[in-house]
Amino acid sequence: MRRAQRELSEGILLTDQYQLTMAHLYFRQGLHRMPVQFEYFYRTNPSYGPHQSGFTVLAGSGSLWAWMAEARFTEKELSYLRKQTGRNGKPLFHSDFLEWLSLEGNFEQLQIVGVQEGRVAHPTVPLMAVQGPFAMAQILETPLLNHMNYQTLIATRAVRMHQAAEGRPILEFGLRRAQGYGANPGVRGALVGGADASSNVGISHALGFDPKGTHAHSMVQAFMAMGGGELEAFRAYADVYPDDCLLLVDTVNTLESGVPNAIRTFEELRKKGHRPVGIRLDSGDLAYLTLKAAQALDAAGFSDTTIVLSNQLDELVIWQIISQIREEGPKYGLEPTAVIKRLVFGVGTSLVTSKGQAALDGVYKLTAINRHNKWLPAIKVSESPSKTVNPGAKKIWRLYDKRGKAIVDVLAKEDEPLDELPELHLHHPVDFSIQRKLKKKDLSRIEQIWVELPQSGPDSPLFDTIEQMRRRKDADLECMYDGVKRLVNPHLYHVSLTHELCELKSQLVSQARRV
Amino acid sequence: MRRAQRELSEGILLTDQYQLTMAHLYFRQGLHRMPVQFEYFYRTNPSYGPHQSGFTVLAGSGSLWAWMAEARFTEKELSYLRKQTGRNGKPLFHSDFLEWLSLEGNFEQLQIVGVQEGRVAHPTVPLMAVQGPFAMAQILETPLLNHMNYQTLIATRAVRMHQAAEGRPILEFGLRRAQGYGANPGVRGALVGGADASSNVGISHALGFDPKGTHAHSMVQAFMAMGGGELEAFRAYADVYPDDCLLLVDTVNTLESGVPNAIRTFEELRKKGHRPVGIRLDSGDLAYLTLKAAQALDAAGFSDTTIVLSNQLDELVIWQIISQIREEGPKYGLEPTAVIKRLVFGVGTSLVTSKGQAALDGVYKLTAINRHNKWLPAIKVSESPSKTVNPGAKKIWRLYDKRGKAIVDVLAKEDEPLDELPELHLHHPVDFSIQRKLKKKDLSRIEQIWVELPQSGPDSPLFDTIEQMRRRKDADLECMYDGVKRLVNPHLYHVSLTHELCELKSQLVSQARRV
């Protein structure tokens, strides 16, 4: 796509047409500056077919702030809106509205509170509340969802892969099969979730990470077509990258050609005083090949080399590979832990597209409007009760038991001092008849998980770094029960409403049904 | 993400690190200008779980040409590459290589032949052959795959939805749950595949399409929270958009509130001389609600209004809705065809993320190198025979039977004049023992499906329009047997190698195994 097309489509017009037609209607009705509150939440944890997640890790907000800070209706954008006509051939948007967009059509007046990037999140819990002028809060819906849904999806997947890999490095390799330029925010999500680096050059540099890579089959093929062989290709690589020599060993035959040629190349490097990095396996039975290659490398005195694995890996495949190595290692005279400790996982399509679950079902719903300086709760009743929005301004709390583990996220009305009550009366978020009481003395911590966002602008040194987000993620994971973190059939983490919020919701639902 | 970050990550650094390290190696070895040929093909048709496609529709090349035409190593890109160091702390890329990139690091010297955008394509058939200097043909791998794999995936899905919808309009609504900015190339793919329009404002304008939209629940909710009701919201909308009035009727209760309020609003519009557009149903049993709404609209004299359906639609859901309307329409005193003819389908996540199959497995493989003005075939042997690349320079042919239907795509050596032979000797692409002979007299057409690409630059009036691509797609679909187009369990379309190409491949495989 042309640069100009990318710029136009990634600026403030990265939104849905109906956001603009509604903003125009609010303008005509004099409602465009009315303060409103929208909330962002998602409904279900990602499920990848045979396995599912018991939580998510929130990502995307930093990208969203940076996007919001620059998004403007400039003459370029307005010229397109000006030209669009309705069925009657007249301009769809009136010129006074476009004039207003050019002056106030930015996101500077929006205030956002919510959960910080990198934190663990759960379904139905509001993760962000956007307050501000109706028209601009409305236009923000689509870009907010686009940023948050995708990066949260990918961060969550990266966490799972990292878990399966028992902390061994995860490299993101997915650009070639990613969903277009979505690859780039995808890499950011992967890094927040704990991927160590990416092969994607541009976005890695843009985010301050060194891109990683080895070489491809084509290099070896070219040397073979010229009448040489794999060994010549390896030697050429070692010659250019004597201290970064990581060789792909499966172009011809992994065990009969690739590994012996790699070892020969490594020996030559060693003689010249260099330390080879390792090999990459990209096809076949990866656990078996790892063990055989480790044996050969050990025998040649290269037991400190890395073995990078790639080829359609996901968390289950990584899990399987590690289990197999653990089980079969001793048969090959290898200490399994030592073998596992030299592994690095290159993950492509499954991570960057979140194979099996390509979207997070996050939504952005109007929960309150402010008339004459008073907040009025807004509700949307759905025929399926689980889809009925939790109304009004609120606060979100996370409760920890005496062992320091998080046990429930609680949605409360804004003025409920949960941390001051001796006992909390909680309801199931859909079936209100399911309820329980929690005593404060049985809890170790009552945490308000919403903070003001963004805490500072994208160019401020206070702006969150990916490293900070990763630390938040690690801290939250540490406070979760293992059952919730399980890769398959995780325990259900509880989300509850306070008794007071339940009552407000019931009352508004009855009112709405009477309209 | 900041604009500067988007620009950096969507320019020439939209590639994998190993493409750069290999290009650097070719430079060091004096191979960077050696002409080579890479081919693009995919291995399997998309399979969405319970259903799968029997073909794809190629998309993305126009975006790729436009990207290639502008992609350059400017000082901005080079400054990042210059700073990157290896493990020894020295620069990873030598300065003479970076200097060369600044001078010749563009795609102007690459020649591309292949299948035109919009045409029907099949697995294992080379769809593009890139010839030119090794270093730049190598760097192109990742961006080419990124553009082609995703847009082809989405174009194919749009074709399927269009088929299920029996030609009724498909609107792309997926931006909010798309994979980041990938939404934008996704919209382009959807349009190539036959989606009529998109709600995504920026990319629609960038591609010369009017974005489409209605209004959201939040607008109705806001009027309700202010003490008004759905009817007030509808009237406000009708007031601003009297000739574009399409009302979302499920915020409160579709049949008891939404449809009656919409009809009342439409009656008021009619009195003022306007023609209402229709309603949108976004939840519940869409076929049943369509029939009930159609009844009510007909009774009020609005039988020419549109009914837009949305809510997690995909090709199977669309198919089910149309079947149900066809079956149950008469029970409601409705002519099913008339009801179907007023439908429009708004498709979100399933289309833009290709739910169930989030990536096409397209690859880009070295097939030949040119030494001393002679093309030498290159091969990569895989332990799985279906992954062994078809070597050498070649031509691709499509054969049509006497009924004018396409029956097989044939990979041939470059110098085989398939259209001049009285009989064609074809082999199964993997199991060479399966073979057959086709007589020219039994064929109506022998078409060479590769042409020179791009036929002209992105700013030329000769550059393909999306309309042209859609016509190509329609023409190709017309020439396909219904069995191959089936939404579920499609027939297998044949792809064959000529006898001569088989012999070359067998010979190279044996050679490679001996290395």
Image (spheres, coloured by chain):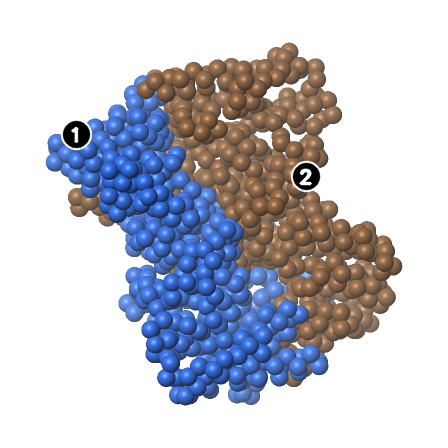
Chain colours: A blue, B brown
Q: Check residue A268 in the rendering and tell me which mark sits there, or answer none.
A: 1
Pinpoint the chain carrying mark 2.
B
> Which corner quadrant of the image does residue A20 belong to?
bottom right
- Please name the residue that numbered disc 2 is placed on: B486
Q: Amino acid at mark 2?
A: Arg
Q: Residue at x 48, y 72 (%)?
A: A495
User: Residue A176 appears at what percent x and percent y?
Assistant: 43, 42
Q: Residues within 10 Å of mark 1 (few under 14, many from 20)?
A: some
Which structural element holds mark 1? Answer: helix
Q: Residues within 10 Å of mark 2 (few under 14, many from 20)?
A: some
Q: Nearer the viewer, residue A33 or A83?
A: A33
Q: Residue at x 52, y 30 (%)?
A: B124
Answer yes or no: are tags 2 and 1 on the same subunit. no
> Which corner quadrant of the image does residue A62 belong to?
bottom left
Q: In which quadrant of the rendered image does the C terminus of chain B lie?
A: top left
User: Residue B425 appears at what percent x and percent y?
Assistant: 59, 15
Give the Cα distance between marks 2 and 1.
Answer: 58 Å
Mark 2 and mark 1 residues within 8 Å of each other at the beta carbon: no
Is residue B9 visible to the viewer in this orientation of the structure? Answer: no
Q: Residue at x 50, y 18 (%)?
A: B502
Q: Is residue B398 left or right of residue B457?
A: right
Residue B370, placed above or below residue B211: above
Q: Residue furthest front?
A: A331
Q: Amino acid at mark 1?
A: Glu
